[in-house]
Amino acid sequence: MSAETKKPAVAQPGADSHRRLKIAARNAYSDQKQEFVDNEQITRFLPMVHKIIQRVVIYLKPPLSYEDLVSAGTVGLVKAARDYDPSRQAEFKTYAYIRIRGAILDELRKWSFVPANVDKQIREAMQLSMQITQEKGTLPTHEELARKLGVSVDKLYKTMKNARAKQFLSIDSTQDNSPPLGASLATENAATPHQQLEQDELTDKLTEAIQQLNKRQRQIILLHYQQQLTMKQIGEVFGITEPRVSQLHAVAIFNLSVKLRQWKDGGY
């Protein structure tokens, strides 16, 4: 079964919820003086909010809900319409995507919390993985890393799963010590030649890191981030369960974080 397989339908909120979002979006925008983007265009781009949420819903944890992310994304869309200037920006679809995604990530980041003991486990696993990679030139196997950490492979998988949201959100942030992946890759063209060089270099390093993943992890990363398939859809492609895809995705994100952190520290 190939990645070209038609994507299964993804359930969306009901018609009443969708109508309320339309009304909220129109009302929020109606007071703006400059209308580079009209109300009908805002309504037309509302499905983009749900599409983006489907790609990050695996990072959703209580008390945050799907509807909370919808609200945040809708606000991002309205603000994009309010601030959009066709004389200075790319096409509205591209600009709206960046603003919606940013608003959703901000909402996730606001509610992101990792207990101290779990954070310590994540740091230990990351540091040891980097050490082994520097010594051997390749990422450690799950069994090797678990053995050196003195934990079971299942325990290691749980640590990687706990790390996934933190690593995903941090590489999309410019406010910590992780590579600003999301910020660097958000637009096709950087504002300055220097920024363009940094973006190109990061893209090259990310490509190298993805190529060094094992085949299944590499396929999951490409299907999820390039083809925009959900975990459930990827499971149907490979004939495996959604939890197993989620587990492999967590491992892949962990390994990519190790490689990108090494590059940032000058060791890769």
Image: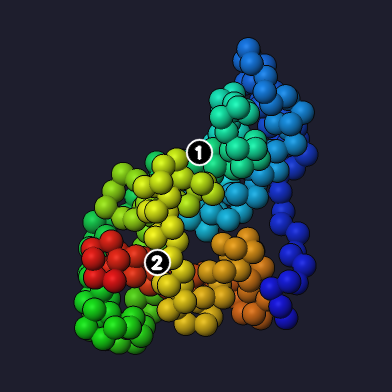
- Residue at image point 31% right, 55% down: 178
Q: Quadrant of the C terminus?
A: bottom left
Q: SS for tag 2?
A: helix
Disc 1 marks which residue?
103
**For residue 7, which numbered disc appears in the image?**
none
Amino acid type at image mark 1: Ala
- Residue at image point 56% right, 62% down: 225
Q: Quadrant of the N terminus?
A: bottom right
- Residue at image point 45% right, 61% down: 203
Q: Quadrant of residue 258?
A: bottom left
Q: Determine the CA span between mark 2 and mark 1.
A: 27 Å
**Of the two numbered discs 2 and 1 in the rendering, the one whose residue sits closer to the viewer:** 2
One can see residue 75 in this view: no
Amino acid type at image mark 2: Lys
Q: Position of residue 222 (x, y in %)?
A: 57, 69
Q: Quadrant of residue 141?
A: bottom left
Judge the density around disc 2: few (<14), some (14-19), many (≥20) Cα neighbours within 10 Å: some
Disc 2 marks which residue?
205
In the image, is 40 to the left or to the right of 59? right
Looking at marks 2 and 1 on the same chain, the residue that comes earlier in the sequence is marked by 1
Q: Position of residue 49 (x, y in %)?
A: 63, 43
In the image, is 232 to the left or to the right of 182? right
